Amino acid sequence: MEVAQQDITIEQTKKETVNITGSEALLEALIAEEVDTIFGYPGGAIMPIYDALYDYSDKLNHILVRHEQGGIHAGQGYARTSGKVGVVFATSGPGATNLVTGLADAQIDSTPLVCITGQVFAHLLGTDAFQETDVINITTPVTKWNYQVTDATEIPEVIAKAFYIAKSGRPGPVLIDITKNAQIQKFDFEGYVKCNHIRSYKPKPVVRHQYVEQAAELINKAKKPFILFGQGVILGSAEQEFKAFIEKSGIPSAWTVLGAGAIPTDHPLNVGMLGMHGNYGPNVLTNECDVLIAIGMRFDDRVTGRLDKYAKQAQVVHLDIDPAEIDKNVKTTVPVWGDCKETLPLLTALVEEKKHTEWLARFAEYTKQEVEAVIEKELNPTTEEMTMGEVINQLNTLTKGEAVIVTDVGQHQMVACRYAKFNNTRSNVTSGGLGTMGFALPAAIGAKFGAQQRTVVAVIGDGGFQMTLQELGTIMQTGIEVKIIILNNRFLGMVRQWQELFNERRYSFVDIQSPDFVTLASAYGIAGKSIDQRGDLQSALKQMLDHKGSFLLEVMVTKENNVFPMVPQGCSVSEIRLK
Amino acid sequence: MEKQEFNITVYTENQIGLLNRIAIIFSRRKINIDSLNTSPSEIESIHRFNIVITETEDVVRKICRQIEKQVEVLKVYYHTNEDVIWQELALYKVSTDVIAEKVSVERLLRENGARAVVIRKDYTVFETTGHREETDNLIAILQPYGLIEFVRSARVAIIKDSDGFNRKLREFEQREPGEEVFENEYLNKGEKVFTM
C-alpha cells in the first residue's frame, strides 16, 4: 500500500509544476532527502535561503551555531552517529572559508556532508564584491565534489547529485555554492527526483570473484593471519558481515582509530588498537603475521610507521571500496575491491572455519606485558595525581560501554581511544586523519542530534576546548544534552610529550593557561564541576551522567604524563616503545 | 624505478572547475606538468585531456587512480612514449624580407616538413608538427634569420594499441542510467596494474 501511495505522489509531483524560488526548491530538496537537522549560520549572501527557512522551521530543525567551523564539525558529528548526511549552511566569504577545516576533516575521514554556501550575485562574481571569495576553488582540494549554482533551475538536480555523491561509494563532503540571484529567482519546479546514477561516477568498483577466491586461498593457507579493520566497516554498515567473517575464520583483528567500535571492545577476537599509540601486540605482530588482511582502512602513516619495514614478510589482502587506496601505501598481493558489505560475505563463504588458538595467545602475551608496563599504571595509578586513563576507565564502568565518546585531538584522544569501551558501532567520534583540535565540542553537539536517545560524552583537552568553546552558546540555546569532560593537564600535552622525548624537554610554547571552565560553563547556564582528587572522581562522573542537561566536568590530571606505548616517528611498528 | 615521460589520457565531462581539480592532483605532489592539452573529444560534451609528466610508473599509476576517482572523470589511461603516436604543432613568425632574401624557402619547408600558413609583405608564418626535437630544430635554423615569434602547442597523443575508446564512448552516450555502464578496464588488468 505504502509503495503504491508513494508512486502516486511521484507521479503527481512530476506532472504538476509549482512556481517557487530557488531557496524554496533547495528546502524542498532537503525535505525530499529526509533531512531533519541543519547546522548553520546566516549572513548576507544566504539571506534568501534563511528567509525561506522561516516558513519551513516546522519541518527542518535549524541549529544556530556560534561559528561556521562549529557548524560543520556538528554536521560531521551528526553524520558519524546517525549514518545520514550532515547538512550545513553558511554564508559567502568568511562564512564559507570558516568551513574549510571541517571540509578537510570530513574529506580525510570520509564523512558524508552537504554544505550549502551563499554567494554574491552572479553578475558580481570576480569583481571582489563584498564577502565574495572563490569558494569553489578554495574548497576543491577538500571536497569530494563541489558546484556553483547561478541559476535556480539547476537547484533540484544539483542537490540530488550532491546527496548521491556525498553518501555513495566512499563518502565525503560536497559543497554547493548558490549565488544570491539563484536563491531569489522563481522558476517552475517540477518536483524532486533523487539521483542514483551519474555516468562518469563509479561509486563501487565491480567485485572480481577471482580476487575473492585468491584471497580466501591465502587466508586458508595462513598460519598467522591478522586482520586490520578501519572505518570502512562502519561506513559500509558491514559490522555484522565483518563479525561473521572473523568468527568463522578465527582471525585476530585490530582496529584503526576510526574503526573502533565496529565490533565490541571485549569481543574475543578484538586484539586492540593499531598505530603510533596503539596496543603492543598488534604493532609488533604486524611484522610477524604471514597474511595481513586490511578491511576498509587506508594504511595511514600513523598506523604503519616506517613503510619500508612494515609487514614485509606478509602477503597482503586489501578490501577497499576506493581503488585509489589499493597499493597507495602498502603493496597488495590480492586486491579485493568493492563494498565490504558485499565482499565480506563472499569471502566468509570461502574461508575455512578455524581457531588460531596459539597465534591468538601470542597477542595475549603481549597484552600481559603491556598491562604490566603501561596499562596498570594508567588505569590504577598509585601516584597522587589522577591520570587520563583512570578517568576513562571510571567512565566505562558507569556507562558500561553504551555511550558515544567524542574526542578532540592529542593525548586525551589517544588515551580515550585506547581505553574507552564500545559495545556499539558508531560510538567513537573523533578527528582521525586531519587531527583537528577544536573538533570535539561542536562534533559532540552534532553527535547528540544524530543519536538523541544515546548518552554523548565529549572528552576534550584543555587546549582543544579553548579552540571552539564558543559552541557552549549552541548548547545553551538548544538545550541539547552533552556531557563534557575536560582532561586538564595545563599543557598542550601531545606536543609537550614529543618535546620531552625528542627535543630534550625544550618546552616551547606548550604551557597553556585556561580560564575557570566551571565559571565559564555557568555563564552559559551549564552546570559544572572541577575536581582534582581521586576520591571525587566516581561521584563527579556519576553526577555528570545523572544530571538532566549538559554538564561540564573538569578533571585536573598529571601535568607531565606520556601516552605509551609509542611508535616513534620514523620507526618500524615493531620498534614500539613501552616507556 | 626510473623516471620517464608518461602520456596520461583523461576522458571527462565538460565541467567548469574540473581542470583545476585535475591540476591540483599534480601540484599537491609537487609534480610539474610538462605539457597539457584539453579539447573536445569526438563525442559532444566529453573532453579529452593529454597530460605529459616525467615520473616513475609507480607514481603515475597512483596519480591516474586519483584522477579517475574524480566524479566527472570517465576514464584514465597512461602510456610511455613508445606506446603512443604523438605530435606537437609549432608556429614560427619571421620577417618576409629577410627570409626571402637569405634562405631557399622552398628547401627549408621541404627539409623540415613545414608549410607557410601566412605570407605577408612584413612577415611570414611557418607551421610544422612533430616531436620536440623536430620543432626545436626549426627554431635553430630560423634563429639566424630574425625569428620574431615562436609558439608551440601542447602534445596530443593517440594510443597505439587501444581498440579505441570511441566505440565505448558511443555506447556510453546511448545507454540510459543503470548500474555499471561500462567495466573499468584499467582496473581490470590486474596483472598489469599490480606488482604481485
Image (cartoon, rainbow, N blue to C red):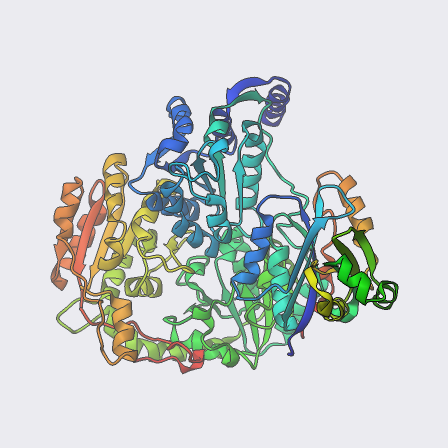
Instruction: Say above or below: B66 vs A158.
Output: below
Question: In the image, what residue occupies the spot 42% across and 57% down?
Answer: A261
- Residue situated in front as seen by the camera: A93 or B104: B104
Left-right relation of A135 to A189 = left
Q: Is residue A313 visible?
A: yes
- Residue situated in front as seen by the camera: A543 or A467: A467
- Residue situated in front as seen by the camera: A150 or B86: B86
Place of residue B41 in the rendered image (x, y in percent of width and height, measured from the top left): 75, 48
Question: In the image, what residue occupies the spot 27% across and 78% down?
Answer: A503
Instruction: Say above or below: A141 vs A47.
Output: below
Left-right relation of A500 to A432 = left
Question: In the image, what residue occupies the spot 34% across and 75% down?
Answer: A565
Instruction: Say above or below: A441 vs A453.
Output: below
Instruction: Say above or below: B108 vs A540.
Output: below
Quadrant containing the N terminus of chain B is bottom right
Quadrant containing the C terminus of chain B is bottom right
Place of residue A380 in the rendered image (x, y in percent of width and height, measured from the top left): 22, 70
